[in-house]
Image: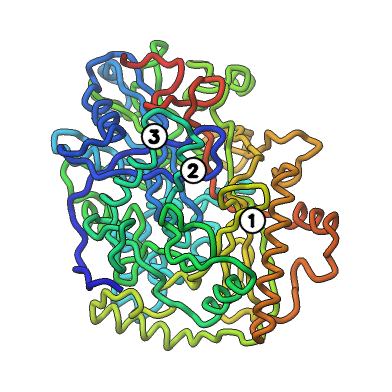
Amino acid sequence: MGPKKKNARPTERSVLLAQQGPRENALHAVPQSPLSPSSSSPWLQSISKSFDRVGQRTRVTVTIASVMLVFVALVVFALSAVFHAGAAPAAGAAGTEEYDAIVIGGGPAGAVISKLLSDDPWRKVLLIEAGNASQAELGGKSPIQSTLNAQGLTKFDVPFYWTKVANTPSLHWDYPDVNVAKALGGCGIHNAMLYVRALPSDLERWAMDGWTWAKAMRIYLQMEDYDGPNSTYHSSDGFVRTSGPGMRDELSEQFVQACEQIGLPRSVDFNAPSGRFGAGYYHFNTRDGVRESAARTFLGPLLQGQAQSQRANFRMLLNTMVLKVNVNDALEAQGVEIYHSDGTRESIGLSKKGQVIVTAGAINTPKVLMMSGIGDKGVLQRLKIPVKKHLSRVGMNLQDHPVLGVTFESVNSLSIDVESELERYFRAKQAKESNVTSFGVMGSAGISAGAFLIPPGSTIPEIQLTFFPKKSEPHISNSSDLNHTSQLLFTVALLTPRARNRVILVPSSKDAASELVPHITSEVPEAEEAEHLRGDDVWKLSWGVAVVREIAAALAQKGWAGKEISPGAAISASEDLNAWVLSAVFRNSHWVGSAAMAHTEEDGVVDNHLRVFGVKIYA
C-alpha cells in the first residue's frame, strides 16, 4: 500500500451537487467536486451561481439533483429539488423561525448540501431527517459489543456489521418492496461501502451539454484521499478516503484465479477508465476501520459526536418528516410543513432569500414533489392534491440493478472466530492504527472481489458479479449467525436494465404522518411484467448465471466449490433458466432515475442545468 496517511480528516470541505442522469441511463454514477474560488468546473460554477442568484428573482426555481459520492456498492443516489423562495411567510404564520435554506433528507446528498450551504456563516441552514442518529460521530448511541463500546462505536460504524444493519426493519422506511434506509446518513449507513465510479460510456450515453468524462475525472481526483499505490487515476490530496479491501481471504483470490482460468482478464483497478472489464478487487470507503459514509465525512466535523450541530448557523431536526413544500400559486416556495415524532405538525418558513432543497432519495423525492403539487396533473387530481405544475415524468423512469443469488456448496469453508476478530479490531482501534489491513474481518465488508462482464453483442460491462465467501448478502440471508452456512454465494446484477419502474402514491392506514405513501409499480407492458424485467434483461441475467457456473466449475477443479444449490444443476435448458430468473430475481434497492435529466420535459424532469422544466426559473 502507499505511505501511511494521517488519521485526521480535513474539517473544511465543500462539494458540488451533481444531478441525476438522463432517462436512458441505467448506471448513474456522477461525481461532485470540492468548491473553491479557483475551481473552473462548469458544474460547480452552475451550482454556485444558482445559489448566489437566490433572491435576485421572486419566481421559484425548482432543481432536482442527485449526489453520487461513490461511497457505496449498492450505488447509493439521493435526488434533490430546490425551490428558491419568493416572499417570506406573512406575520403570524405557524413557525416563527425562518431559514435561508431548508434541506429535506439527511442522506448522502443532504449531508453534502448542508455542509456546503452552512459554510457561509451568514446563511441559516436547517436539515430535516425522518430517521434518528446513526454513526457515533453523528451522535448515534447504539452499542453493539462491550469491547467496542469503549471505543464509542455503534453498529453503523463497524464495516462488517453492514448486513445486520441492512436487515433491521426499524432502520428502514416501511414501504412495500423497498429497502431504503431511514436514519441520518441514508443508504450510506447500510451499504457495502464499495467505491465504484462512473464510466466514460455512462456520460457519453447521457449526451448532455456540460457533462463530460474529462470534467468528471478531474472532480474524482480532487475529492479522493486514496490509500494505495501512486496512480494516474487516483489522488491522495482529497478528503474522501478510498482504499483496497481490508481483508483478502483465500477464497476470493481463488475466485479471481478461476475467472482468469475461464478467459476473463484480471483488472488491477476497476475505477480506471478502461479497467472495469474483468475480475479483481474492489475499492472501499473506510477510514481507520470505520465506515466512511457521506454523512460522517461531511457532517461529522459539524456534529462532533452530538445529535445537534456545533456550528451556530446550522440546525438539524431528527425523527421529523416533511409532508410537503408549501408553494403558492406563483410557484414561490414559502417553506415546509413537517410532522414531529410526537404527532404535532408545524410549518417552517423561509427568509426572503431562502430555498428548500429536497434530498429525499429516489423514492421519497417524487412523493415530496407530488404532495407539493408538482407532478402529473391527472395523478394529482385523482389524489385530490391541488395542482401547482403539471410535470408528467415525476416519479417515472425509476431504475434498479435487478440481482440474482447463485449458490454452491463450499468444500473448504471459511471459519470466523468472532471473539478473536472483535479483539483484533479493538486492539487496532485502541492503537489508532491506520493501515486498512490491521482491523481484520470486522474492519471489512466481508467481501473483497468481483467481476464485470460484457454480454455478447454489447461493448460495455453490463453484468456485475460479487463473490461472497459466506452467504451473507442481506437481500438473501437474514441470519444473524456469522457462521450460519458453508455456501458460496455469487450475486449476478444487471447494471443496464431496459425495464423502468415508477413511484406512485397509494393510501396507507399505517402512516400517521401522511395519508399517502410511495409504492413502486412498473412501466413494463403487462405481458412482460415479472419483477420489472424486460426480455433482454432476462436473457442477460441468464447469461450471467451461465458464466458463474463456469467460474464455479473452475473452483471445483481446485477443490473449493461443491455442487450447485441454487438454481440447481437440473435447471439447464435456456427456457427453464429464464423461468428461474423471473422467479428468483429480487430488487437490489439501487434506486435512481425518478427525476431524470433530459433535453425536454416530455422525457425527463430537469435540464442539464438542474432546472425543472416548465417552472418559472431565472433566465
User: Residue at position x 56%, y 49% from top?
Assistant: 460
The residue where tag 2 is placed is 201
The residue where tag 3 is placed is 211
Could you say where residue 313 lies in the image, as x and y percent from the top left?
18, 40
Alpha carbon distance from label 2 to label 1 = 22 Å
* Residue 431 makes an appearance in the image: yes
Badge 1 marks a residue whose secondary structure is: strand
The residue where tag 1 is placed is 403
Q: Is residue 452 left or right of residue 557?
A: left
- As shown in the figure, which amino acid type bears the numbered disc 2? Ser
Q: Looking at the image, which residue sits at the far top? A: 330
Position of the N terminus by quadrant: bottom left
- As shown in the figure, which amino acid type bears the numbered disc 1? Val
Q: Between tags 2 and 3, which lies in front?
A: 2
- The numbered mark, 2 or 3, whose residue comes first in the sequence reads 2
- The numbered mark, 2 or 1, whose residue comes first in the sequence reads 2
Badge 3 marks a residue whose secondary structure is: loop
* Residue 138 makes an appearance in the image: no
